[in-house]
Image: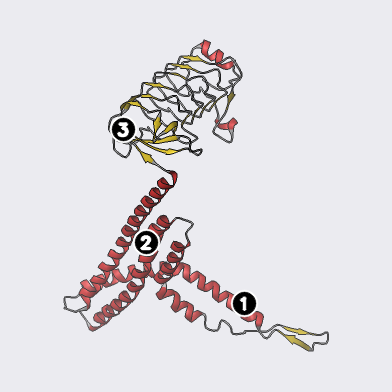
Amino acid sequence: MSDVDVAKLEGLHRSLRFNSIFFCAGWFLFAISMLGLMYALGPMHKLPGVLMAIGWGIMGGPKIWTVVLFGMKGALKADYEVVTKDGLGNRLSSDGGLQSMLVNLGGKLIFALIMFVIGALITMVHLIILTIGYLVLSSKTKAVTSIKPDGKLIIIINVAVFIGAIVLGAVIQKVGFAAQDASDRSKRGVQTSASFQYAPNEAKDGVVIEEYLGNGGDVIIPAELGGLPVVGIEAGTFMELGSKDWGPKNRNKRITSVKIPDTVTFIGSTHYGVFQGCTDLKQITLPKNLQLIGNESFKDSGLTSIIIPEGVKSVGNRAFEGCANLTSVTLPQTLEGLGDSAFGNCASLVDVKIPAKQLTYFSGYSDQEKYDTGSFKGSSGISAASQQAIRNTGYKGKF
């Protein structure tokens, strides 16, 4: 290796070490703030944003401060002055170069801001170029020099900090989510029994089941939990979607039947379903005090028939959509409205008993004319008699 190559290698080593110090310190602060603290402290907390800005500025330090410091020279120097003269051309007043200085300073500040934004990116690109150049040049020599192993160690440290900061940020994020969840559960008064997770309703006069923790099979929901009546079942409680395992206890046995106590007044909400995807659920006993069946509550379930009790006023969008084994439906006299595709795409549905009165057919879409094609769309097997009875309620959608 020539003296020239050795000199180049030493120069690359110095530049690599200098830029690496700023990169490691800045990236570590930036990554743990963006990936960890922002989630742990919440998006409204100012500290993660401040630390991210500081970290970004440190990363761009070698480029930002050199260029900005050099570029800010003469920022307050007046290049010209604005002079006011009378009609005869006599000088009356001057701004002393104030306008010139303000324009000059404004341009320099904009330049500084641009350098702050792109400085870190320039540093990272430069560091990659230095790393490649150093490794290539270092591999060409067989001479023993102390800077060779030292330079490789710097590169290893850079990679370790880059990956380590991401991993640490992810860990902080996970811990933060767990802490927020624990805090939320505590505020809402969440409790667990052998088979259910539940929390008080807004009125604090009943509880709502939020998660099923049991082992599947035949499920009986108790009338009381924690000394209060069970008044509702929240979205997602029994959902069986995704992998073969469901719930925090990873039960791998599907539910086959459910008995719901008469204390329950609502099943589901405007979100995803309660029993969605429960394909082995063949029968269910609905409570006599039920008033609302929410969106997608029984979507894609294995129900073969359903009798909706008197008292229910509304059945939500896609509530029974895709129930391939559903053959008969009995709707109550108290029913006031059916959501879009409430019984849509039920291939085996034949018999529908519906109250002989005008009903409201509502949609989950803002542009109803474009997207809403009916509560029974895709259920073409419904008998002619049932179709006519449905039409008599004011239904104009498809079957």
* Marks 1 and 3, how far apart at CA: 71 Å
According to the image, label 3 marks what residue? Answer: 214
Q: Compare marks 1 and 2 and give the one earlier in the sequence.
A: 2
Image coordinates for residue 56, horizontal then vertical, percent: 42, 67
Q: Amino acid at mark 3?
A: Gly
| Badge 1 vs badge 2, beta-carbon distance below 8 Å | no
According to the image, label 2 marks what residue? Answer: 32
Mark 2 crowdedness (10 Å alpha carbons): few <14, some 14-19, many ≥20 = many
Looking at the image, which residue sits at the far bottom? 90
Mark 3 crowdedness (10 Å alpha carbons): few <14, some 14-19, many ≥20 = some
Image coordinates for residue 63, horizontal then vertical, percent: 42, 74
According to the image, label 1 marks what residue? Answer: 103
Q: Residue at x 30, y 75 (%)?
A: 17
* Marks 1 and 2, how far apart at CA: 39 Å
Residue 240 picture quarter? top left
Looking at the image, which residue sits at the far front? 227
Dot 3 falls on a residue whose secondary structure is: loop
Looking at the image, residue 55 lies above or below residue 100: above
Left or right: 165 as drawn, with respect to 289: left
Image coordinates for residue 65, horizontal then vertical, percent: 45, 77
Q: Residue at x 52, y 10 (%)?
A: 385
